[in-house]
Image: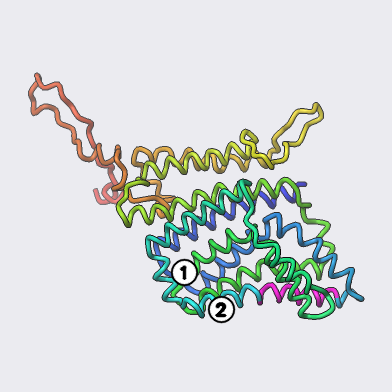
């Protein structure tokens, strides 16, 4: 119990930090190295691992390989081949993606306003899906045909088992594959998509091989349950917040003035505020589990979940001054430009210097004084 709480807290906290770092790299630099692209793939892959449809497969798949094989060594070999097959499937997909579009085409597409609108719609669909409104799945006929060819008797059978996993887990991995595709479009190198999906597939395949080599670890990981759904819903809120950034890019390009800075901030304040209330148990969705009960039969909130709820709530409070023009430097890379803000109190103070009425006592009109802050360099020079 303590392990999964710690895993839940650390993983989502790291996700929030890495998303902000990714945004900074995309918006400010506009170009990434192959090393950054590989790390992007690892990030989205490890986050995908924490989704219910993948996380629950680890004990089932590894136990299947170890029990169906004639010896433990053969079971480890089959699990390793299974892991390499997962890597091969994603990497081949990236190879064909590069072959069809080319790196330059992907980069040009990523900078267009139409592409940003498309990504906004895509991320909104993914986010709403994570909240539980519907589930994104591939046609069942695809899965059935591939699953019919899966077995542990040959490499081809193991490969089709891996392909079945990729197809079945599509509902959980699709949003993060979409995030990775956005990242690789920022990469001008031709090998960018291949390197990115190599990191993504490595993160997904690594646990299968690791648990096959050390099956005792399966007893130490948290059992799948309601906490996975909670994690998935949290990702849904964050995915919707991320979608607004891409709509903002198109809004600035076409000068629609739909998502001015204060409108954008208002939406983010609502989204992360709802996330905080959700973690506090004040907001319930149809597929959520009930909070645990204490000895008196009353639902209670764990200390870990309470502490973690502080993060989005504190972030919400941090953003509120931005409605009046505060710069919010910590998330400035995600926000629209300050000039789109209708009311900016800092700008208002700068433009309205103090006037005492030019020594005319009959003049009662006064404006707010703007006092220029004294810098440390000026103090040291004096």
**At 38% from the left edge and 56% from the top edge, which residue is drawn?**
249
On the question of residue 371 being in view, the answer is no
Residue, disc 1: 185
Image location (x, y in percent) of residue 334: 42, 53
Main SS, magenta residues: helix
On the question of residue 192 being in view, the answer is yes
**At 25% from the left edge and 41% from the top edge, which residue is drawn?**
372
Task: Tell me the element at label 2.
Answer: helix
Dot 2 crowding, Cα within 10 Å, few <14, some 14–19, many 20+: some
Q: Nearer the viewer, residue 203 or 61?
A: 61
Q: Nearer the viewer, residue 41 or 5?
A: 41
Task: Tell me the element at label 1.
Answer: helix
Instruction: Give the residues in magenta.
Output: 75-88
Image location (x, y in percent) of residue 49: 68, 60
Residue 120 in magenta? Answer: no
**At 42% from the left edge and 69% from the top edge, which residue is drawn?**
31
Which residue, as the protein is rendered here, is positioned at the far right? 70
């Amino acid at each position: 119990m303590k392990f999964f709480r710690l895993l839940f807290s650390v993983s989502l906290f790291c996700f929030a930090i890495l998303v902000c770092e990714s945004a900074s790299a995309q918006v400010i630099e506009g170009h990434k190295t192959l090393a950054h692209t590989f790390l992007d793939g690892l990030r989205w892959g490890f986050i995908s691992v924490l989704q219910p449809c993948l996380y629950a497969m680890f004990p089932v798949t590894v136990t299947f390989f170890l029990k169906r094989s004639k010896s433990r060594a053969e079971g480890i070999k089959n699990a390793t081949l299974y892991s390499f097959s997962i890597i091969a499937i994603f990497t081949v997909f990236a190879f064909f993606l590069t072959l069809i579009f080319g790196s330059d085409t992907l980069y040009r597409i990523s900078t267009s306003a139409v592409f940003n609108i498309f990504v906004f719609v895509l991320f909104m669909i993914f986010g709403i899906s994570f909240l539980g409104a519907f589930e994104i799945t591939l046609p069942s006929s695809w899965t059935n045909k591939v699953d019919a060819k899966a077995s542990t008797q040959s490499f081809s059978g193991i490969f089709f088992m891996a392909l079945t996993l990729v197809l079945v887990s599509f509902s959980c991995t699709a949003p993060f594959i979409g995030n990775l595709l956005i990242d690789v479009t920022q990469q001008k190198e031709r090998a960018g998509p291949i390197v990115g999906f190599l990191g993504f597939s490595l993160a997904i395949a690594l646990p299968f091989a690791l648990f096959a080599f050390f099956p005792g670890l399966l007893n130490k990981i948290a059992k799948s349950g309601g906490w996975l759904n909670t994690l998935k819903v949290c990702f849904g809120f964050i995915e919707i917040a991320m979608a607004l950034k891409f709509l903002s890019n198109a809004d600035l390009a076409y000068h629609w003035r739909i998502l001015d800075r204060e409108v954008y901030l208002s939406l983010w304040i609502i989204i992360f505020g709802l996330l905080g209330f959700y973690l506090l148990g004040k907001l319930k969705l149809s597929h959520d589990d009930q909070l645990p009960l204490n000895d008196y039969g009353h639902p209670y909130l764990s200390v870990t979940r309470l502490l973690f709820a502080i993060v989005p709530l504190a972030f919400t409070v941090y953003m509120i001054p931005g409605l009046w023009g505060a710069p919010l430097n910590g998330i400035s890379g995600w926000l629209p430009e300050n000039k789109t803000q209708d009311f900016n109190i800092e700008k208002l103070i700068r433009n309205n210097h103090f006037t005492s009425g030019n020594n005319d006592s009959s003049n009662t009109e006064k404006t707010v004084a703007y006092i220029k802050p004294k810098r440390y360099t000026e103090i040291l020079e004096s």
